[in-house]
Image: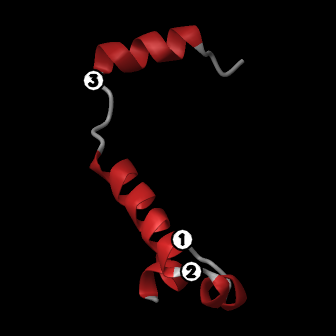
Amino acid sequence: MAFGLGRLAWPPKFFWAATPREIAAALRAHQDRSRGSPPERPALAALMDAFPDA
């Protein structure tokens, strides 16, 4: 409940309508994203060159 209402900021109506399978999928997706490491400096520089802000 804390994950769905807190971390995901789902409104109560959406949280209570979600199935256990949907909540588990959201939890797995969130855990997969949080396990990644930030890119190394050279990779970040290459991305910034390839996709400039302006």
For the residues bearing labels 2 and 3, Cβ distance under 8 angstroms: no
Q: Residue at x 35, y 16 (%)?
A: 43
The residue at which mark 3 appears reads as 40
**Quarter of the image with the C terminus in it:** top right
The answer to whether 22 is drawn above or below residue 4 in the figure is above
Q: Secondary structure at mark 2?
A: loop
Mark 2 or mark 3, earlier in chain: 2
> Which label sits on residue 41?
none
Q: Residue at x 54, y 71 (%)?
A: 22
* Number of residues whose C-alpha sits closer than 10 Å to that of mark 1, classed few (under 14), some (14–19) or many (20 or more): few
Name the residue nearer the viewer: 24 or 33: 24
Q: Amino acid at mark 2?
A: Thr
x and y percent of residue 3 in the render? 44, 79
The answer to whether 52 is drawn above or below residue 11 in the figure is above
Q: Amino acid at mark 1?
A: Glu
x and y percent of residue 26 in the render? 49, 65
Q: Residue at x 44, y 87 (%)?
A: 2
The answer to whether 2 is drawn above or below residue 34 in the figure is below
> Which label sits on residue 22?
1
Q: Secondary structure at mark 3?
A: loop
Quarter assignment of residue 19: bottom right
The residue at which mark 2 appears reads as 19
CA–CA distance in space, label 1 to label 3 = 33 Å
x and y percent of residue 49 in the render? 53, 9
* Number of residues whose C-alpha sits closer than 10 Å to that of mark 3, classed few (under 14), some (14–19) or many (20 or more): few
CA–CA distance in space, label 2 to label 1 = 5 Å
For the residues bearing labels 2 and 1, Cβ distance under 8 angstroms: yes
